[in-house]
Image (cartoon, rainbow, N blue to C red):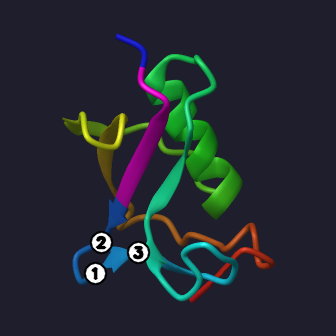
Amino acid sequence: MYLKFVGVVTYDEDDIWMSTRFKSPIKGSLQVVFGKSDGKELQTAARREAREETDLELSQMQYLVTDQDYDCDIYICDIERFKPRRMEPDKVGP
C-alpha cells in the first residue's frame, strides 16, 4: 500500500518536541515532523523529513501506527541524546 505522508513524533524524558506553524492554512498550530513520502520507502521519507526539519539523523525510529484517514504512517523517536534545531525558520518556530 502506498501512503502519501509520514509523521515523526520526537520526544525526550520531559516533552514531545513540536513546532508552531508560521504560514497558512494551519498558521499558529502545533506540529510534529511531517511531510510527503514522495513514493519513497516510508522510514526513509520519515528520516529525510526529520533531517530537513530538525537537522537530526534519526536511526532508531519505531513504527507507531498507520492513520488511514490522513494517509499517513506515524513513527516515534526518543531524542534524549540529541538537540533538535529548527531548520525551516520561515515556516516554523518554537
Residue in the foreground of this view, choosing between 47 and 60: 47
Q: Quick check: can you spot residue 73?
A: yes
Q: Amino acid at mark 1?
A: Asp
How many badges with numbers are in the image? Answer: 3
Q: Which residues are magenta?
A: 3-9
Q: Are marks 2 and 3 in contact (CB under 8 Å)?
A: yes
From mark 2 to mark 3, how far is it between C-alphas?
8 Å
Prevalent SS, magenta region: strand
Q: Residue at x 50, y 58 (%)?
A: 33
Using the image, determine if residue 86 lies above or below residue 59.
below
Disc number placed over residue 17 in the picture, else none: 3
Q: Amino acid at mark 3?
A: Trp
Left or right relative to 60: residue 21: right
Disc 1 crowd, CA 10 A, few/some/many (<14, 14-19, 20+): few
Disc number placed over residue 24 in the picture, else none: none
Q: Are marks 1 and 2 in contact (CB under 8 Å)?
A: yes
Q: Quick check: can you spot residue 61?
A: no
Residue 7 falls inside the magenta stretch = yes
Residue 73 falls inside the magenta stretch = no
Mark 3: which secondary structure? strand
Residue identifier under label 2? 12
> Which circle, 2 or 3, is nearer the viewer?
3
Residue identifier under label 1? 15
> Which circle, 1 or 2, is nearer the viewer?
1
Percent across and percent down for residue 84 are 56, 69
Q: Residue at x 43, y 65 (%)?
A: 32
